[in-house]
Amino acid sequence: MNPPPPPPLPDELTPLLHRLRLPYLRAAAPEVCATARAQRWEPTEVLRTLLAEEVRGRDQAMHAQRRHAAGLPSGKTWASWQPEASSIPRPTQQALLTLEWGGRAENLAVGGPSGTGTSHLCEALAAATIDSGRRVAWFTLESLTTLLGRAKVDGSVAKVVTRITRADLIVIDDVGLLPAGQDAAEALYRVVDAAYERRSVAVTSNLHPAGFDTIMPKTLATAAVDRLLHHAHVVLTDGTSHRLTQATAGTGVQPLV
């Protein structure tokens, strides 16, 4: 048998809590007050419990807001990362997970064949960055180029770049998978230059960054890579595609029967 619901708050308290913008405290207050009466809590314990509920609720809401704003592509985290399946040395994996490099505004360049975990690694690190209370912005090179291309139309490129670099970690995924012309090279350069020594930029590619000048205009590529690699950890993967391996083994889908 379910216990009866706690009595509601007095009518005069609800508008006050609305005005003070304390939604989580307001939601928890009836049950906390009922428990406090039954167990004869000290007034300070009631206050501490209610404020702790408000802080917890705000922290959860902020975390959800940051995850939504980051635009992470698939929801992968470190829990789904398989360290033993990666060609990246274990000590390097653990050092990256400390996120100390992000606190120092250092960059990360992850290069390797498609399917070897480059994007998964960066998304897991991005999710951990959000969990630590910091902000993340995730782009593919194509989506970044499109965003700045639209900003060119109304002359808001500087404003958009400033907004992007408010994030503590900016991820630019899949550099080199699609042809990259002048606009893509300019987009990459603008963001890397604006973030230089202020924010961390993580780039994934099927190429080493030194080869970016083979897929985009050399002058902009050289300038972007110069800034990207100055304070960067370069991590290279190898081996066959994890996706292809799973598909070949028949583990990529649930059996139909």
Image: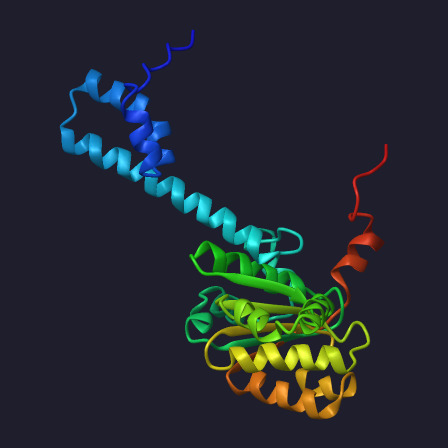
Residue 65 picture location, percent across and down: 51, 49
Farthest residue to the bottom: give it: 219
Determine the residue positioned at 73% across, 77% down: 184
Q: Nearer the viewer, residue 192 or 83?
A: 192
Quadrant of the image occupied by residue 45: top left
Image position of 17 (left or right of 175): left
Determine the residue positioned at 43% across, 6% down: 1
Above or below residue 40? Residue 183 is below
Q: Nearer the viewer, residue 219 or 252?
A: 219
Q: Nearer the viewer, residue 35 or 115?
A: 35
Farthest residue to the front: give it: 154
Which part of the image, by quadrant, shows the C terminus?
top right
Determine the residue positioned at 58% across, 83% down: 228
Residue 90 shows in the view: no
Image position of 70 (left or right of 60): right
Quadrant of the image occupied by residue 60: top left
Above or below residue 67? Residue 129 is below
